Amino acid sequence: MKTIAIVATGGTIAGTGQQGKTVAYRAGEMNVDEIIQSIPMIQNIAHIKEYQLMNIDSNEMNPQRWIVLSNTINEIVKDEHIDGVVVTHGTDTLDETAYFLNLTLHTEKPVVITGAMRPATATSADGPYNLYQAVCLATHNEAWHQGVMGLFSNTIYSGRDIQKVNNYKVDAFDQKAFGCLGYMQDHEVYFFSRTFKIHTIDSMFSKRVLKDLSSVGIAYFYAGASSQLLYDLAKFHHGIVLTGSGSGNYNREWMRAIEDLSSQGIVFVRCSRVAQGIVFDDEIFDPQHCCIPGNTLTPQKARVLLMLALTYSLNHDEIRKIFNEY
């Protein structure tokens, strides 16, 4: 059997509350070994090596913890006896962590991130089955060099494109217009597509040990939004991701502020608050080409990429190329 490392960070999958209830629980209360004990069939799939790295609600995840998680996994996968890694994580910020790991892990080995929408003490808790399938996926030969994958409700997602789309249902994730990478039926794995964007071992960000990240904020545009928000963010951040209306749009007041702050060295990326679609260059809303298009990335994922890109280069054209490739 293969050996799979489970790196636990907490989340609802490790949450506890009133027995049987699905609400009013505390995330990150149980250790991963307690969860594994509730899945006896997992021992027939792989040898498990446990790492209880953190035990937090995923809303407490931050860039420094991302770096600790990434550097830890990069050390784990150097062990030739480790065949794959599963990360347990809270669902609220799982999509951000998945993309960060997709960009910073230097390995071809399978890395799967999973979690739960119901705490471990709930009736029909979904965490144990998700974890079981994540381990099965991490042992699968076709899972090599697929980048970081998310596993939820029998569905395999790309770490770049996975997105939480429901805050209530057990089947809470999707991959926007791109579909999924594949499906699982119990322990069986069925791949049907793959991502063509650069990731993991081919990523420039995976080739060095990370110590810090540049500071990037997100500005959300709405009808009547003041440009003062942009100036306030610029006091504390090197870059700003714009969550614009429509195709990443905003009013003329924001346009003037963006042009002003861009001339002062602030790097802007345009994304959309609309769930589906793509953001391109726009001659009307960005005639000076101050902004880098976020393409299909959500604002929170564009922030992850910009934080990493700014550690690599301050050149606007180079960062634009990075966004096109990643």
Image (cartoon, helix red, strand yellow):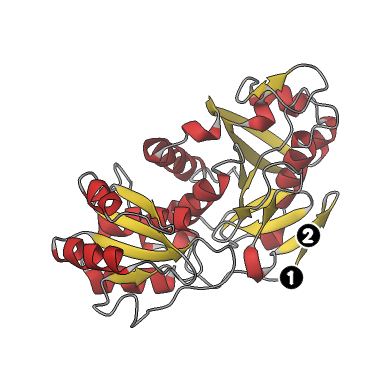
Left or right of 182 in this view: 293: left
Write down the residue under mark 1: 192
> What kind of element bears circle 2?
strand
Mark 2 residue type: Tyr
Horizontal and vertical percent position of residue 11 = 61, 31
Disc marking residue 167? none
Q: Residue furthest left?
A: 264
Comparing 144 with 9, the one in front is 9
Left or right of 196 in this view: 244: left
Structural crowding at the residue carrying mark 1, measured as other residues with C-alpha within 10 Å and reported as few (<14), some (14–19) or many (≥20): few
Horizontal and vertical percent position of residue 17 = 72, 18
Write down the residue under mark 2: 183
Question: Could you tell me which residue is drawn at 62 percent across and 26 percent down?
Answer: 27
Comparing 81 with 114, the one in front is 114
Question: Could you tell me which residue is drawn at 51 percent across and 73 percent down?
Answer: 278
Q: Is residue 59 visible?
A: yes
Q: Is residue 207 visible?
A: no
289 versus 60 height, above or below: below
Mark 1 residue type: Phe
> What kind of element bears circle 1?
loop
Quarter of the C terminus within the rendering: bottom left
Horizontal and vertical percent position of residue 146 = 60, 62
- The answer to whether the residue labelled 2 contacts the one labelled 1, judged by CB atoms less than 8 Å apart, is yes
Question: Could you tell me which residue is drawn at 24 percent across and 70 percent down?
Answer: 316
315 versus 31 height, above or below: below
Q: Residue furthest bottom?
A: 283
Comparing 203 with 78, the one in front is 203
259 versus 108 height, above or below: below
Query: In terms of image quadrants, where is residue 183?
Result: bottom right
Horizontal and vertical percent position of residue 299 = 45, 57
Distance, label 2 to label 1, CA atoms, is: 8 Å
